[in-house]
Image: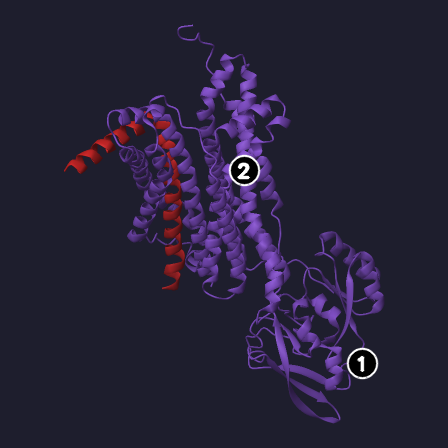
Chain colours: A purple, B red
């Protein structure tokens, strides 16, 4: 199970990386082609057709792509060799755990060929758009090294919007396909569609930002106008930055969602936002400490006179079912909400037993075994629904809930036992809250309250997954930094002639450096904002859609948890642009010194 | 024959241009080499750690 999850995560990341590589390489080929316009013009003047000019561009990219692919194979094998001991340790590989032995690398030649082929394909695909543009170039414009004025491509904006909508539609489809083997691959397709769609919108975004120029001070106005005046170059750089930053943003968002989901749905004795109290006095004290918390009284179907109800079923009675407490809790809707099962409210009100767990009631029914002396023991079948919002393990809370009205109708014992109170706080308990609860218990020993402590011993696999995620984030961060540096450097080197002209017209070196810094900041910020939209947009849609769709599924699931990876978001949208700005202003060279005009 | 010669000539031009703009060429080469290296490292590690474990 874990292995297949790693495979899906790996191929998702690979697909995103390849799309990012295509976008970045496309920006590089576009700018390289612009530099070779004059040479291409000479070829055209000597009789070369448009198709042949395109072939030159594609062949150049393909040659470099092949060289890159051939260089990437030994580099990848060396990287794998270096990472292997750390990964073996992180996933607790038995061979490494017990003998300290690192397994030899299993090299599959077919996979190396596949990687090299994908690298070559990436270079060729990246060169297609610049090649088509070179093929359509008028000879005179090429000889003058002038790119024809860029037309506003409305179709590209439409394609971008359609792709983003298709990607978001696939996110919703994924919710319907829960549990199906297709679900992970629909997820991969949705990420790729949203990524390419937003990257296609970079040109429209540059045009939109260009309209704000008039409200900016001189340097900002010049920077924005220059970017908007060269939409092809600027959009390519923004798309490349987006592609590079999308990877850490997606990983960060995924990690935050997993952590939120873990908090909301993992099996536990009590959730992180619940407190169990045994009396109204204790409940009152706890609620004073947790403003906004709601309480739900409940009894367990077991009394001191020997009366008891236990829930049975083929899966529930299995020794590996994980159900430790087979007595159902009896309470009202508030109890269901406090336990996190609000999505099963209709079935609960209709008399069904709500089971917290996965696949506990495959046939939608459970048997209640009722012992209520002096009446004879009896067994009855009642409808049941599952709620996969994290099973309750251990004895603290029961895994089954039945409404008070249903319990009265069925004549179940346990209705008159003194109630306990489940308190659900407005948000998960903080360390400070737990300290206050501990102090309350020390102050009033008669009060009995229970809450969940964070688990200091996370399962081994979870620790391994966290290490791998951190390693992936580090790699993604390096790729992102490299791509931002490359995109900004390419765009700024392309803008150099314009900056030189400004210098000749009297702009001071400090002013041109400020201009370069402002352009780098704009490119990096626009790319970062698109990357944030790529990762957070689908997550928002998934949360909103899942709260609508999931209660209607055969097995009601809770809505997807939503969490914003604030640290990664701040690094991507503020830190990286600041770094790009600092690098551009420190490393950017002043334009060429004043030279007299020829013939002037 | 003519087509082969034509492609050969175009490839020579492409090679000359690539060598002329070395910094750009190295950048493009790195942009392809890095994802390929990542793919090779990833698939090799997956095969070594998981496939072997399931055999």
- Marked residue nearer the N-terminal end (1 or 2): 2
Q: How many labels does the image show?
A: 2
Q: State the image coordinates of residue A31 (x, y, percent, origin top left).
A: 40, 30
Residue at 79% across, 74% down: A419
User: Where is residue A404, by image quadrant?
Assistant: bottom right
> Can residue A445 be seen?
no
Q: From the viewer's perspective, is residue A275 above or below residue B25?
A: below
Q: Name the residue under label 2.
A: A205
- Nearer to the camera, A430 or B7: B7
Q: Residue furthest left?
A: B1
Characterize the local packing of mark 1: few (<14), some (14-19) or many (20 or more) Cα atoms within 10 angstroms.
few
Q: What element carries label 2?
A: helix
User: Where is residue A353, by image quadrant?
Assistant: bottom right
Q: Is mark 1 on a helix, strand or loop?
A: loop
Q: Looking at the figure, which quarter contains the C terminus of chain A?
A: top left
Label 1 or label 2, whichever lies nearer to me, is 2
Q: Name the residue under label 1.
A: A416
Left or right relative to A428: residue A484: left
> Can residue A226 be seen?
yes
Q: From the viewer's perspective, is residue A550 above or below residue A235?
A: below
Q: State the image coordinates of residue A575 (x, y, percent, origin top left).
A: 58, 35
């Amino acid at each position: 199970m874990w292995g297949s999850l790693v495979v899906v995560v790996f191929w998702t990341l690979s697909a995103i990386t390849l799309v990012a590589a295509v976008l970045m390489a496309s920006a590089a080929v576009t700018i390289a082609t612009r530099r070779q316009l004059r040479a291409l013009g000479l070829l055209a003047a000597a009789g070369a057709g448009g198709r042949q000019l395109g072939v030159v561009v594609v062949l150049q990219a393909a040659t470099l792509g092949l060289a890159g692919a051939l260089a990437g194979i030994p580099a990848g094998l060396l990287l794998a060799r270096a990472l292997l001991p750390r990964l073996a340790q992180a996933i607790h590989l038995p061979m490494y755990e017990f003998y300290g032995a690192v397994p030899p690398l299993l090299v599959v030649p077919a996979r190396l060929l596949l990687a090299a082929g994908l690298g070559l394909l990436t270079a060729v695909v990246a060169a297609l758009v610049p090649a088509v543009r070179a093929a359509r170039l008028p000879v005179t414009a090429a000889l003058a090294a002038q790119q024809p004025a860029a037309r506003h491509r409305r179709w590209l904006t439409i394609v971008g919007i359609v792709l983003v909508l298709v990607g978001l539609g696939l996110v919703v489809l994924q919710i319907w396909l829960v549990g199906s083997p297709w679900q992970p691959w629909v997820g991969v397709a949705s990420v790729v569609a949203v990524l390419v769609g937003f990257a296609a919108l970079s040109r429209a975004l540059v045009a939109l930002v260009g309209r704000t120029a008039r409200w900016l001070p001189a340097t900002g106005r010049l920077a924005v106008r220059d970017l908007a005046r060269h939409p092809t170059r600027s959009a390519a750089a923004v798309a490349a930055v987006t592609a590079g930053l999308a990877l850490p943003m997606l990983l960060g968002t995924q990690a935050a969602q997993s952590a939120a989901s873990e908090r909301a749905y993992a099996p536990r004795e009590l959730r992180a936002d619940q407190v169990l109290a045994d009396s109204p006095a204790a409940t009152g004290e706890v609620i004073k400490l947790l403003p906004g918390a709601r309480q739900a009284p409940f009894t367990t179907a077991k009394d001191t006179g020997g009366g008891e109800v236990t829930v049975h079923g083929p899966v529930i009675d299995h020794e590996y079912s994980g159900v430790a407490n087979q007595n159902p809790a009896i309470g009202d809707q508030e109890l269901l909400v406090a336990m996190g099962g609000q999505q099963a409210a209709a079935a609960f009100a209709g008399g069904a037993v709500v089971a917290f767990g996965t696949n506990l009631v495959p046939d939608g029914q459970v048997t209640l075994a009722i012992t209520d002396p002096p009446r004879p023991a009896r067994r009855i079948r009642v409808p049941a629904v599952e709620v996969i919002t994290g099973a309750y393990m251990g004895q603290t809370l029961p895994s089954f809930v039945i409404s008070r009205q249903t319990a009265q109708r069925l004549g179940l014992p346990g209705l008159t036992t003194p109630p306990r109170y489940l308190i659900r706080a407005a948000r998960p308990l903080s360390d400070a809250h737990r300290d206050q609860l501990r102090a309350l218990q020390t102050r009033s020993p008669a009060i009995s309250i229970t809450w969940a402590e964070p688990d200091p011993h996370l399962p081994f696999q979870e620790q391994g997954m966290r290490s791998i995620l951190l390693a992936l984030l580090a790699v993604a961060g390096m790729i992102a930094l490299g791509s931002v540096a490359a995109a900004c450097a390419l765009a700024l080197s392309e803008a150099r002639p314009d900056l030189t002209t400004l210098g000749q017209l009297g702009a001071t070196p400090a002013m041109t450096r400020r201009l370069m810094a402002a352009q780098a900041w704009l490119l990096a910020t626009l790319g970062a904002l698109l990357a944030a939209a790529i990762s957070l947009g689908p997550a928002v849609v998934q949360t909103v859609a899942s709260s609508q769709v999931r209660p209607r599924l055969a097995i009601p699931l809770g809505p997807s948890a939503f969490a914003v990876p604030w640290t990664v978001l701040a690094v991507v949208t503020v830190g990286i642009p600041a770094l790009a700005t600092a690098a551009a202003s420190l490393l950017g060279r002043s334009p060429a010194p004043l030279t007299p005009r020829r013939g002037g | 024959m003519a087509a082969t010669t034509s492609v050969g000539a175009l490839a020579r031009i492409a090679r000359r241009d690539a060598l002329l703009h070395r910094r750009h060429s190295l950048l493009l080469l790195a942009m392809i080499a890095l994802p390929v290296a990542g793919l090779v490292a990833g698939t090799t590690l997956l095969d070594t750690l998981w496939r072997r474990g399931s055999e």
